Each structure stands twice: as C-alpha cells, then as structure tokens.
Amino acid sequence: MARYLESVCKMCRREGMKLFFKADRCYTDKCAFERRSYAPGQHGQGRGKVSEYALQLREKQKVKRVYGLLESQFKGTFRDADRAKGITGENLVTLLERRLDNAVYRLGFAGSRAESRMMVTHGYIRVNGRKVDIPSFRLKTNDFVEIAEKKKKEERILANIKSAERHPLPEWLSLDKDALKGTVTRLPRRDDTTLPMHEQLIVELYSK
C-alpha cells in the first residue's frame, strides 16, 4: 500500500495548523510548526491570494491527512456519505469518526492516529471480543473496543492513556480505564469532532 515517507511535520506547516501527527512532541517546543509556522518550500512565506478551488482543495487535503487516508479511500468515504440520508458533509464527518483507528486514538489507547493504525493492523485491538485488524472498520452503537489481554500492560499503552487526559473524551464514547475498554454509546455527530473543518468546501470540490 502507498505510504507517505517524507516529514509529517511538513504537512502541518502546509495546512497552517497542528495536525498532531507526533503525539506528545506536538505539545513541546520541539514541534516544527511552533518553530516555522509558514508553509514549507522556497516560496512558503510569500504565498499570495488563493482561489476558491485552492481553498476547497486545501480543506480536503487537510481532512484526508488528519485521518490518514489515501485519495481513493477518502473519495470512497465521500461517496458513501453522499449516498446516505441527510447532509453529505455531516455524513462524511460521521463516517470518518466511526473508523476503528480513529476510535482507538480518541479513546487514548494511541498517541496519534498513525500509531492507532499500527495497533489495529498488528492485532492489538478487539471489537466485541473479536480481533479486528482493519483500520477502516466502521463502528456501530453499542460496539465495544478494547486492548488485547496480552497487550494491556505494555508501557507505551499505559503512557498513552495517561497522556490522553489532556484531551476531552468525545461524548459518543465511554471509557473504562482500568479495563482499557471503550464503548460506542451513540453514533458521532458533526459537533463531536475537535478538528476545525469546513466540510462544505469538500462537498463543493467533489460536486464539480
């Protein structure tokens, strides 16, 4: 599968905001965005006026990068959102939030979504008691997500749980810290995401 092999800090600088790809490092003065908040490249500090299309494209790229999707995966998710009942933009946010790798991150089991994808693909995660190693698996109401019994005492996971206290747990999830088990209490809504997002720009981009 295709992978992004360059510095992920460049993506934060390109999108003009912290995307928290490096977990705890993003909260320190070592964060590349704190040091150089302008876009990367020779002309990063001299970018002028942008077109409407450029705004739509940047919004799509930002959301795609935050959730760690390739273009084909993101387009497929948008297609599902467009087919579903309701407002397409809000459906898109809901589908992205329901991804298993996102839920693992939001529960605090992983320090970043990249780490949560690694945990899922390496068999760390159980959904309703069964191993699921597909990061794009979509959770439903009353599903419960937990760390595999053999992995519950790993220092990295315990450290992630402690560090996650700085992030509020979304209302659509509940967490039993002692059992390292989270439950989907309801489907996520648009206002449950903490990412500054203008999903209508993405809808307009794909509607052209």
Image (cartoon, rainbow, N blue to C red):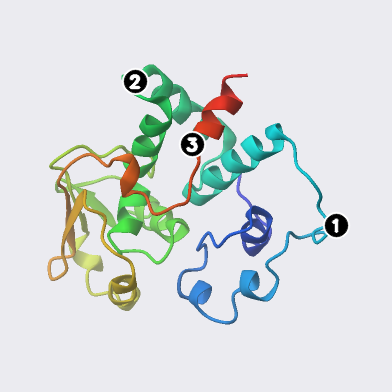
- Say what amino acid the circle numbered 1 marks: His
Residue 44 located left or right of residue 94: right
Residue 44: which quarter of the image? bottom right
Residue 45 located left or right of residue 6: right
Q: Residue furthest front?
A: 49
User: Are discs 1 and 3 less than 8 Å apart at CB?
Assistant: no
Where does residue 74 sit, x and y in percent of width and height? 51, 34
Q: In terms of secondary structure, where does tag 2 sit?
A: loop
In the image, what residue occupies the spot 32% across and 22% down?
A: 86
Which residue is tagged 2? 84
* Mark closer to the observer (2, 3): 3
Q: Which mark is residue 199?
A: 3
| Disc 2 to disc 1, C-alpha distance | 41 Å
Where does residue 104 sit, x and y in percent of width and height? 31, 55
In the image, what residue occupies the spot 66% across and 39% down?
A: 55
Residue 89: which quarter of the image? top left
Q: Earlier in the sequence, mark 2 or mark 1?
A: 1
- Say what amino acid the circle numbered 3 marks: Glu
Which residue is tagged 1? 43
Where does residue 19 sit, x and y in percent of width and height? 53, 59
User: Are discs 2 and 3 less than 8 Å apart at CB?
Assistant: no
